Structures are given as structure tokens and as C-alpha cells.
Image (cartoon, rainbow, N blue to C red):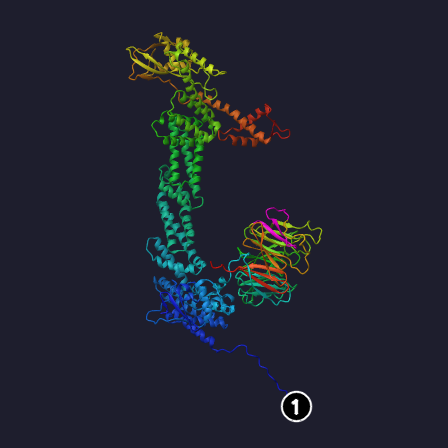
Amino acid sequence: MASRRGRIRFNVGGKIFETTATTLANAGRHSMLGALLDDSWNPRQPAEGEAAEAEYFIDRNPACFAVLLDLLRTGELHVPPNMPEKLLNREALFYGLLDQVRAARWGPFDGNRLQLVDSVSGRAPGDGTAIRAGPDGGCCVAHGSMVHVYDWMLEEHRPISLDYQQVNDVGYIDAESIVISARERLGKGDGGMGVFSSSTGELRHRFRVSHYDQVKSFTAGALSLGSSDYKIFASCKGRCNEYGIGVWDQITGQQVDFFYEPPGCCLGDADKLQWLDGDKCLMVATLFPRTDNCFIGLLDFRDKSVIWSWSDAGTSVSLSLDEKRVLHAIAIEDSRSICVVNQYDDLGFIDLRSNAGGVRWSSRSKLTNRKAPNEESCYPKLATHDGQLFSSMNDGISVFCGPERVLTSTLRRSYGGSICDFSIGGDRLFALHSEENVFDVWETPPSPII
Amino acid sequence: MSAQKKRNFKIEAFKHRVELDPNYAERTWRVLEHAIHEIYNHNASGLSFEELYRNAYNMVLHKYGEKLYSGLVNTMTGHLKEIARSIEAAQGGFFLEELNVKWGDHNKALQMIRDILMYMDRTFVPSNHKTPVHELGLNLWRDNIIHSSKIQTRLLDMLLDLIHRERTGEVINRGLMRNITKMLMDLGSSVYQEDFEKPFLGVSASFYSVESQQLIECCDCGEYLRKAERRLNEEIERVSHYLDVKSEVKITSVVEGEMIANHMQRLVHMENSGLVSMLVDDKYEDLSRMYNLFHRVPDGLSTIKDVMTSHLRETGKQLVSDPEKLKDPVDFVQHLLDEKDKYDKIISKAFNNDKTFQNALNSSFEYFINQNNRSPEFISLYVDDKLRKGLKGVSEEDVEVVLDKVMMLFRYLQEKDVFEKYYKQHLAKRLLSGKSVSDDTERSMIVKLKTECGYQFTSKLEGMFTDMKTSIDTMQGFYSSQYSEIGDGPTLAVQVLTTGSWPTQPSAPCNLPAEIVVICEKFRTYYLGTHTGRRLTWQTNMGTADIKATFGKGQKHELNVSTYQMCILMLFNSADQLTYREIEQATEIPPSDLKRCLQSLACVKGKNVLRKEPMSKDIAEDDAFYFNDKFMSKFFKVKIGTVAAQKESEPEKQETRQRVEEDRKPQIEAAIVRIMKSRRVLDHNTIVTEVTSQLQSRFLPNPVIIKKRIESLIEREFLERDKADRKLYRYLA
């Protein structure tokens, strides 16, 4: 009998394990061990008249099985120091327990309990452009014309590129699909935007833009992925009057809308797009325009209107170096405001409820401490997660909490130079350093045993 | 030196890949293919799961995933084609059974295959954008079985036929139906919708269209509704038994549309059984059914509501204009209340206390009650009647109920100030004649009016009560101070009424008998002595008196009469016969009142303490009156009432009307001044609307009258017209 009162015996690579059906049930239906149980989660009974097997023989590594069985028993993962992670992950994949392993590795994201777990160095020739966290804990890094893709085990997959054109932005549609936006090559019809498989790196779909029923090539800039209605937004630059924001459907890949740039607003050059679910509108921030002023606006696509806008026109007439310039912006829907940051790492807030408000700076840089930004340092970036606000400055990331945005933690690494981009997703934070092409992975450890 | 032979070195590339058994993939696939065959042939128990899992794992690991996947598709398709043939071969009723059995088998097989190929499902399928095994199995089943030309139409016809049979009363195998529809749902909502639901809804629509046509020809409204309700419940039950939950809304809307919406008007207006006759006959059950069914279709309830409203207005108008009913105010109001009770009950019992119906009821009542401009008077008379005698021996709660109902009618009145006028009159009569049943009830009515219309409305009514109370105190004070001087002369009870609070008609005082005048004078000196700066006027037309009289055979009676009658009778103490003129001269009672008094003293049978010559019903100016010493009565106390008009006569009505109009003038003016004071400048139309809204709680002012009041205010220089725009008025501080 393989089972006696719910007990099950395994012979894994010659070593005997004995466990219960309830422990195996923790593996779930979609795993090899779960498939050994019948519909009511009991061990399968042999048919009448057949000799019951004494044990299940599995031709696998017994040491790893021991670790995984322990995971099923306790929900915790304890890897012996001599066991390579890669080995364990491979075995977990065989049994279909990879999801359990990942869930046991790190806990729900909390900006104040982050630990540095890994630093991965790349071998890209140039500076990094962007890093994006995937929904399952993986990430991708854009350098020049290449995008390097890492899964949650930080295994590198085949790099992605769109006709080897300069990549402007990347984003995850889901764990399996990455969209990248790239510069066009004039007259060739290259560049634009494409969706790639994150595991195989193959190009699955290329987004098209048509103006007046004619397909045109374009340069795609910032991306935003609307989560609720499966849309992709991208700032697009084409010929003279083909500037604006393009909208595609995530599922069909077809263009569904195009918001042409109205006079006085730069949309085609936008540096940041953010879809606001509650208000059903898109925030567009153009902070490094070629000619005009900085512009932040909220677009309503239903009636093609700019429902709110802010510009630094007039304030930056005297282009002195000391002038506070907005370098990055993020909309915080809960507090109905847009948070911005300047070259001195001051946070500022713009009220979304009034249309003519200025920036309310909450100065945290002391006047004495203020050093002129040198060429080497990177522009600050902002991110939010679950009510916490994150801001990168030089080689560290600050965490602010609460409605008053109190500084609660700082994340810093000793090498790699200043942080040029960071991203939060899949309960992890990835920070990309500019000099050494290193990115750091920060995660929250699982909750301690009581 | 021999020509150096150039030796060609051939450097062999290092073989990265160790050659496997070239037939490895083929062999492994054979094992798996065999296993799939065994699974479909119900022979799975001999298979080793671990081994098969490892084989599938190895194939994927060694990059034979594509082979494994396409092999699976081919093998499964082959099996399904075979299954399709066996299902097609099934005869008649066994067709569904066979389909169901095979579907169960396929599902089991699919589960096992998926378990074996789980590793492929996890790694190869997502990265190569293939359909996962389970879904693949369902898709293949759909394409090879459900959409096979020989099965598709047969399946649909069979299902629809079964449902039709169930509708006509046969019993069908619901379990089988449930399994088949469940299969269609499992194959994806689009399969269920396209291959079953749409045709099902179409067939249902035509079925119910025919049935409803037949029913409406032969059934009355109530019966039709009962049948429609049963059909609706059947469909809901059907959905719960063997259809998708989402179909419930669709099929019920089909039934509702065909059976109710299409015949709504006809049902409601059906002769002898439609809505009107249900309302008349209080058929709560039918009404409730109609409400619940019509509730489901658009415009259903508004149809009911409209018919009910027009019926109510029609009957209400008849009621208020029926000359028979107008004769008796109490009966009139009682009818209104009964009507209201009836519909309240219908709404609460059958219409789920629907707010819109309550509003319709209220607006209908408001409409027809105000059609008759005597309604305020009648309602007040009804209250008067109840408070005089109607509520004797009734518990306090019941009294409250009656009063609340009256208040409800009161709310419908537009001319609340007219009601107030009448109520004041009636209350004054009740208080002065001491006819009121209970002081508490009176006060409770006042409180109700106060909560309804505010302090201002009832301040005078409350003043009347205060007067009554202070009068009692005054009389006590009077007697305790003057006790020694009065002796045993006539007893006097004076009610001191504040001018303005009471609806007093100015009347000339009559000549009181000498005995009375003495004590009246004493009271006057006492009262003016305690309250300086006041003036007392005697309202002799409103008092009463108890007098003791001794008749011919020594019979003693106590007569309860009015003050006027008392004056007349006192004259007979000194004379046995008096002519009309003599009486008029002696008492100076106004002729109309005098005639009425004499009539009640001499002409009412059983109470004729006077005798008249000649004996006729009416009083003429040269009649003579005698003391009737043959007067007989079995009661010791005899109450001689004045022949009093309860309902107002036509000229009186005119007079009250005029007084009401006169009272409204200052109210309208006050409202205009209040509004202008805060707004300073306003145009004519806005003033009219604002005044109307301010005064609405009391009455509905006529715009023409408002205009007149504005003109009067301009004359008196409260307002002025704007120099540029004649329509604008300015307030002059």
C-alpha cells in the first residue's frame, strides 16, 4: 500500500520519504505532487485486484526534495548553504512548485523593511536608460538599443531589441510580455513599438500608427499601461503634425485612438505618462522639452480635452542655475495632487483640484547643503507604492510615508554610482546605477515566525 | 626536397551536444501516445504516473516540446473523431445520454492527460503561446463534436424539443439537461450563447407570443395574470435547474415582453376585470400580482399608476360634486376618509407601499378635494361633530387615529386659512357652550395643526383656550370676594374673551332682566377693579342660562336656554300674554334672532313652554304668545335649543369668504415686504412666485390679488417701480 491512513511513501533517487496527503495537498492541483491525489484530495486508490505499489519512485535529487517537502509542510523555505539556488529552482520547476518557492522567498512589499538581496552587474556598453520591474518579480533593463530581461530568479533571458534602435521606454503588459518603445530610423519604417516574449525574446507584435488611414513610422517615447481597461498609451513623434499620444489595445494590439497635440501642450515629447484609474484620464509630463516650457497635463480621451494643466511658463524667465526646475512628476490620486522633484531633491506638490495653482515646495535640502548639480549626477526619479512615496537622489532612494510625506527610510549602496532609474513591482524594488551598470534588488523578508 | 606536401589539418569542431539515442524522442512519444490511448480506453490503472510525467518532462527538456504538443493534438483529435461517430450512431433519445457519457469520459481523460503533461503545460505552453492542455481538450471537443455538422443541429433540436415538452406539461430528465447545458457552458460562454441560448430565446419568444394571444382571448385579467405569473416562475425554476444563471434575466425578459408588455394596455383596460374593477372590488391578490408583474417591464408601473390616478380623480370628482353628499358634511368627509382608507390599504397590501403610488394618491386627493371650495368648511364641521359627540366613549388611541386622518385631509387643502376661519368659529361655539367632549382631544388637535402649519396658525386658537382658563379663575375670584353681598340671587358665569382671538360678530346687547343686570354690574366693577384699562362688552347672543320654572300642576322643570330665550321667558314672570312687538320692545333682541328664539320656544313639539296665537310654524310680527301652563315633559331638565344653522347659509358663506379675502391682504403684503426687504430689487414674476411659495402652506394666493397688493404698496411708498424697467420693483427703506 502506498498509503496507509493518508500516509504516502516516496522513493526519491533512492532515499525514502514519508509524508501525508494533507502536506501534498499544499502543493495545489497544478503540481506533480498534487496530481497524485484524487478529486477529494485523498491518495489515489489502486484499482481492484491490482497489487498496490509500496511507494512512488521519483528519479530526482533527494536533497532538494527534502527542502521542497519541508516547504510544503511549513510554508517556509530554508535552503542549506551548499545547495545552489539554481538547482533548487530546477527541481521546484519539475515538481511544479516554483510559485510556492517564490512566495516563500520574500514577503509583501513594505518600503520601510527592504533588504538588499542581490546586485546584478550587466555588460552593456553605455549608460542605462530605464529599469522596469515585472509583475512576477522579474525585471528588464534598457541600455541604448538593447533590453536585458531577467526572470524572478534573476536568470538572464535573451535580450530584446527593436531593429537595434535606441530604446526610450519599456514596460510589462504581463509577466510574459514586454513592450518597448524605440526611436525610428528615418525612411526605414523601423523603430516604433513592439511586444516581445520575456522568456524567448521573440517579437510578437509591432504597433502601428495610422494618420488619416495611412500607416506612418514614428518614434515612441514614454509608455503607460492602463491596467483596468487594457490599453497602452505612448507619446509619439512623427512628421510635423503627427505629434501626440497614441492608444492601443493590449489584447488585439490595434490602435484605438490618437490624441493630437493641441497648441501650447507638448505631448509627443512627453517624458512620463501615467494612467489614473479613478479619474479615467492620463497624466502627461513633458519636463525636458526641446523648445517650450515644462508642461504637466491631464488628458480626457473621451472628449479629447485637456482637463487640467500646469506649466512653468513665466516662472523660468530668468534661466539662472539656482532656479528650481521640475525634473520628474508623479500623480498621487489619493491626495489629488501631483508630486514633483527638482534638481536639489526638493519634493513639491501641485494641487489637482485647482487649475491655476503653483508648486508648493516642501524644502528638505538645506541651503548650506545645496550643491550645484554636476554633470555626473543623475536626475531624480519618483515612484509610489501603497501610499509610500519613493524618490531617488544621487546614490540613494528615500522613502516617505503618511499624508505629510515624512522621510522614514533611506536605501543606499556603496558602489555603482548614482541611481539613474528605479522601479517597484512584484513586491520588489529594482534600482539601476549609472556608472557600473549594476542593478540592485531590494525585497521585504517574509514575516518572522512569531 | 620533396615538395612539401601541405597537410591539410582538419580541425573538427568540438561536439557540444552528446548525441542521444536518435530514436529517443520517437520512443518516448510512443510511450506517451500509448498511455493516452489507454486512458481513453479506460485502462489507465496500469499506467505509472511518475514514469509518464518523467517522460513528458524529458521530452520538453530535450527540446521536443513541439513534437509532444502536436502529437497530443493529433492523438486527441483522432479519439474525438471516433467518439463523434459513436454519438452520431446513437438512436433517438439515447443521443443525449451518449453525448453526456462521452463528455464525462473525455473530461476524465483530459484531467489525466493534463496531469501527465503538466510540465509541458508550465514551461513549453506559455513561452510558445500555445493553448494549455485543458483548454485545448475543450476546444477540440467543441470543434470535433459540438460543431460537427451531424451533431450540432440535432443537439439543438433535441434540447429545444425537450424544453417545449416540459412547457407543455411533460416530465423530462432534468439531470441530463443540466449536464448537457453545463457542457456547453464549460466550452465557453460564446458556445453556450451561440449554440443554445440564442435559438432558445427565439423559440421561447414565439411560444409565449402564441400562448399569450390565446390566453388573452379567453381569460379575464386576473386569470391571465395568474397564468403569466406561473409561466414566469416556471422559467425561473427552469434556469435554476438546468440553465446558466445569466440566462435568467434574458428568458424572464422574453416572457415579460411577450406576456406582459405586449398586452399591458389591453390587460389594464379589460372590461369588468381590468384594473378599475380590481380597485373597486378590493382584489388585493390580483392587484398585488399585477403590481409584481408590471414592475418587471418598463412603463408597467406608470401604466397602473396613470389608470389608478384617472379613476381616482373621476370618482373623487363625482364624490365632491354629488349634491346628495353635500347635504351632510359629516357624511361627506366620512366618505372621503373611507376612500382614502381603501386606497391606503390597496397600496400597502398590493402595491408594496410604493412611494410613487402614494404620491399619485395624494396628488389625486389634493386635486379633487380642492375642486369643491366648501371642503375646508366641511372638514372643520366633521371635526366639530367628532369633538362634540362623535368621540364619546372612544379610547384615546382611536381618537388620535381619527384626528390623524382628518389632518391628512387637511394637508390636501390649498386654502388652509379658510379652514382656520371655520375651525375658529366652530371651536368658539364648542368652548362657549361647553359642548366639547374632552379638553385633551381639543388640545391634541391644536398641537397637530401647530406641527403642520406652525405657531402662527394656531396662536389665536390657543388664545381661546387661555381665555377659558383665566375666565374660570376670574369667576372663582369674583365669588370668593363678593360672596357675602350676592346672597342667593342668580348665579353668573362670565367668560372673558380677548378681542381678536375670537370670531365674535358685533352685536347690540339686549336688555337683560333686572335680576341679572345687578349681578352683571357687580362683576363689571370687580373685573375693572382688578384689571385696569380694560373694556367689557356683553356678548348676549352667545350665552346660555338655566332657569327653574313651575308650570300649571306644580310641575317643576329646569329649562336650559340661551340668554335671549332667558330674557324672553323672564318677561312671562309678570305677564301671561305678550305680543311679538311687546317682546321686541322689552328685550331689544335683533329681529332675526328673536324670531328664531320664539320659534324654538313655541313651535318645537315637547319643548313648547310658550303657546302662540295663531298656531303656525312661522313667527309673524303680530303674533301673540302665552305662557303654556299645560307644558309636560318626562324629564326634569329640558334643553331648549335654538333652531341653529349648522351648515352656513349662502349669504353667510359669502360673508366668510369675504372675511377670508380681507384677512389674506395683510398676509400677502407682509410676504411681499419681507421678500423685497431682503432682495431690494426684483421683477414682477419672481415676486409672484416667491410670494406663492411663502404662503403656500396657508393658501394659494391669486396672482391678480398679489398684483393689487403690490400696487397698494407702491401707493403707500413701500415700493417703487424702476425708472427704466416697469417690470422691476425697488424696495424703499
- Residue A173 on the magenta segment: no
- Residue A352 on the magenta segment: yes
| Circle 1 residues within 10 Å: few <14, some 14–19, many ≥20 | few
Q: Residue at x 52, y 32 (%)?
A: B693
The quadrant in which the N terminus of chain B is found is bottom right
Extreme bottom residue here?
Answer: B1
> In this rendering, is residue A149 above or below A274?
below
Residue B501 in picture, x, y percent from top left: 47, 22
The one nearer the camera, B298 or A361, is A361
Helix, strand or loop at label 1? It is loop
Q: Which residues are magenta?
A: A335-358
- Reading the image, the residue beneath label 1 is B3
Q: Amino acid at mark 1?
A: Ala
On the question of residue B253 being in view, the answer is: yes
Which chain letter goes with mark 1? B
Residue B398 in picture, x, y percent from top left: 36, 31
Residue B33 in picture, x, y percent from top left: 43, 72
The one nearer the camera, A275 or A357, is A357
The one nearer the camera, B118 or A71, is A71
